[in-house]
Amino acid sequence: MIDTTASPTFTLLGQSRPAPRPEPALYLVATPIGNLSDITIRALQIIAGADRLACEDTRVTGKLLQRFAIERRMTPYHEHNATDAGPALIAAIEAGESVALVSDAGTPLVSDPGYRLVQSAYEAGVKVVPIPGASAVTAALLASGLPSDAFFFAGFLPQKDKARADRLEALTRVPGTLIVFEAPHRIAASLAAMATAFPEREAAVCRELTKLHETVYRGALPVLAEEFAAMDEVRGEIVVCIAPPLEDRPVDAADADAILSGLLAEMKPAKAAQEAARLTGLPRRELYQRALALKDR
């Protein structure tokens, strides 16, 4: 039984700390994407001290609360109840309460329904306060080793082949590193589609970031597609980072081989060399000889 009369607290490094009640507002609180130690002190204060805690899955958030000895009630807020739960949360803030919104992992509003609540908050004239912290997007970008001066987060790709191919085609013109989320049971098919759309690009497949089995696979997209196609089963949360367009950067031998490898999966050496010449500007005859050598391997 939760004691609602006691002052809220949280425990950090074995010490109980007070959690002052924040002023009325909607607080968007980032939570860990895996390792619970990545939580911030400010996030713990808001989660423990807010009048209401809205979360996607009470079971997931419950584990976080248990880790830091936070005893409080939770209010479900997710894709299926947002229409009804959202107005109730806004009404609570208008009545003088503070509301903390968390997702199952990472930063709220990134590929979840939280943005609707924020829109409603602004429409109602309610204050919105971001509490920054862990993000799978930036964690993957850091681990990828790809350019980080400009990047574009594309969320989840469409599940159907044609829609996914169309989406990737639209993304080919983005002048920065692309970042997408993907489910483990779809990653092989998605990488195959990426290799077709971006045969010349490097990529990084980041799996289980900040968790025990964290793994980063790096390489040309055609090579990564082959590697994941050969895997029996893939598990865990996955973020894929794709390098920006080559544009004016000179194409070296490794780039040419990566492009040819992707093309040879679908066409004969002569046709692959012709298409690679169009993509790279390199001599078709030279590319044809490289294509034959790759085919022999």
Image (cartoon, rainbow, N blue to C red):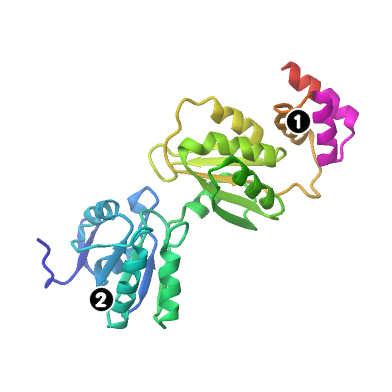
> Label 2 is placed on what type of residue?
Arg
Viewer-closest of 18 and 226: 226
In the image, residue 83 lies in the stretch drawn in magenta = no
Image location of residue 184, percent across then percent down: 46, 38
- In the shown orientation, is residue 121 left or right of residue 166? left
| Disc 2 packing (10 Å; few <14; some 14–19; many ≥20) | some
Q: Main secondary structure of the magenta part?
A: helix
Image quadrant of residue 257?
top right
Q: In this picture, which residue range is highlighted in magenta?
A: 269-289
> In percent of the image, x 35 and y 54: which residue is there?
104
Position above or below: 297 against 219: above
Of mark 2 and mark 1, the one earlier in the sequence is 2
Give the foreground label among 2 and 1: 1
> In percent of the image, x 28 and y 77: which residue is there?
92
- The residue to which callout 1 is attached is 260
| Disc 1 packing (10 Å; few <14; some 14–19; many ≥20) | many
- The residue to which callout 2 is attached is 21
Residue 216 visible from this viewpoint = no
> Label 1 is placed on what type of residue?
Leu
